[in-house]
Image (tube, coloured by chain):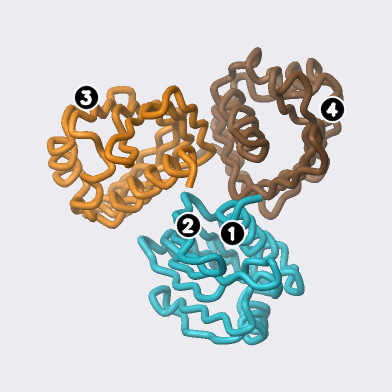
Chain colours: A cyan, B brown, C orange
Amino acid sequence: MDDIEAIKQLKARYFRTMDSKDWAAMRQVLCDDVVMDSTDSGGSVIAGGDDCIRFLQQAIGEVVTVHHGHMPEIELTSATTANGIWAMEDMLRWPDGRELHGYGHYIETYDKSDACWRIKTLKLTRLRIDMTEPRG
Amino acid sequence: MDDIEAIKQLKARYFRTMDSKDWAAMRQVLCDDVVMDSTDSGGSVIAGGDDCIRFLQQAIGEVVTVHHGHMPEIELTSATTANGIWAMEDMLRWPDGRELHGYGHYIETYDKSDACWRIKTLKLTRLRIDMTEPRG
Amino acid sequence: MDDIEAIKQLKARYFRTMDSKDWAAMRQVLCDDVVMDSTDSGGSVIAGGDDCIRFLQQAIGEVVTVHHGHMPEIELTSATTANGIWAMEDMLRWPDGRELHGYGHYIETYDKSDACWRIKTLKLTRLRIDMTEPRG
């Protein structure tokens, strides 16, 4: 499998393990020193793979989530580094019935070590966010 | 075209021929002994390419359907076999106005014969299903 | 990067530059003599890269748009020509609150010159279009 395809499958595991709440498997797609920046989406900057997983577990552990990535633009910048842009859509449904439906892009970098690509940095930008309150 | 790309295009034809109700072309993407399992989505297990097409024709022949696949994880397991996982979203609108909007994953296997990949088994798992009734 | 991957990234730039209203960058993904046909979607036929960009700027410059492409079927027909089909979904929100949510396929051709793929022709077909009026 070539590096571009390997990075696409890395991001596929990122989405699938998040939505299926498989936190141990999700930890494997992140570098130890990953930085995730969701400030453009009302979130914060979180550093470190373990801290990112702990944050996500708390934030969406009880939330039904659907995250999809589209239209990757992966650029290999060396044998062990790469940049990527993904269009994205996410849907969150909280236990109390509130919902978020959002659209935007991930701007990312990747690192390869031990023959394995991982996410090094991730920044989420937004085109649109719709919040809805529970009915009734 | 490499095998991973060929399997992606196979699945693209699966979706496109289903949504455009091109049943003869859709039959071509399925192995003769395909097994489609939608029990996790309230459906059943159907075996055989001809039976699958007959079932789909009855079930959604008059339904406006949109099926999209995302984030493939294709793994070649031999020169003629492969596994795949796809994130998915589907929207069905029945003639009476009822609608289904669902999200989940396909867990699949593929077989290559006569230089052509086909779907061998398909299991649909669900993250979320929303049903809506006609207004008014 | 192989030609199929290059065409996927071309289409990714098409969507991203449209939704981020980066018209100068979007012009670069179109051939000078591009023809865009959206008659099946209630639109018209527009010819020429500059005219297409002018049209889009007027039509959606003030509209929040989200366009996603899925499940590409890219076929190389020579060293410098290719065909493609993409499933698509688009969401438009006008300043007055009206919304369009649509689904369909792009049928496209591509041309390579100066080592760069560009969109030569694009035809949009539709599976479903939902229009909603502002609430209240």
Amino acid type, label 2: Ile
User: Which mark's residue is nearer the viewer, 4 or 1?
Assistant: 1
Return the chain for callout 3: C
Any part of residue B30 in sight? yes
Q: Looking at the picture, how far across and down is residue B66, in whole percent? A: 55, 34
Mark number, residue A74: 2
Residue for point 64% across, 47% down: B72
Circles 4 and 1 on the same chain? no
The Cα atoms of the two marked residues, 1 and 2, are separated by 8 Å
Circles 1 and 2 on the same chain? yes
Q: Which residue is mark 4?
A: B46
| Foreground pick, B118 / A39 | B118
Q: Could you tell me which quadrant the N terminus of chain B lies in?
A: top right
Query: Splitting the image into 4 quarters, where does residue B118 fall?
Result: top right
Q: Determine the secondary structure under disc 1.
A: helix
Categorize mark 4 by other alpha carbons within 10 Å: few (<14), some (14-19), many (20+): some
Question: Which mark is first along the chain, 2 or 1?
Answer: 1
Categorize mark 2 by other alpha carbons within 10 Å: few (<14), some (14-19), many (20+): many
Query: Splitting the image into 4 quarters, where does residue B39 fall?
Result: top right
Amino acid type, label 1: Ile
Return the chain for callout 1: A
Mark number, residue C45: 3
Return the chain for callout 2: A
The Cα atoms of the two marked residues, 3 and 1, are separated by 38 Å
Amino acid type, label 4: Ile
Amino acid type, label 3: Val
Any part of residue B43 in sight? no
Q: Is residue C31 above or below residue B23?
A: below
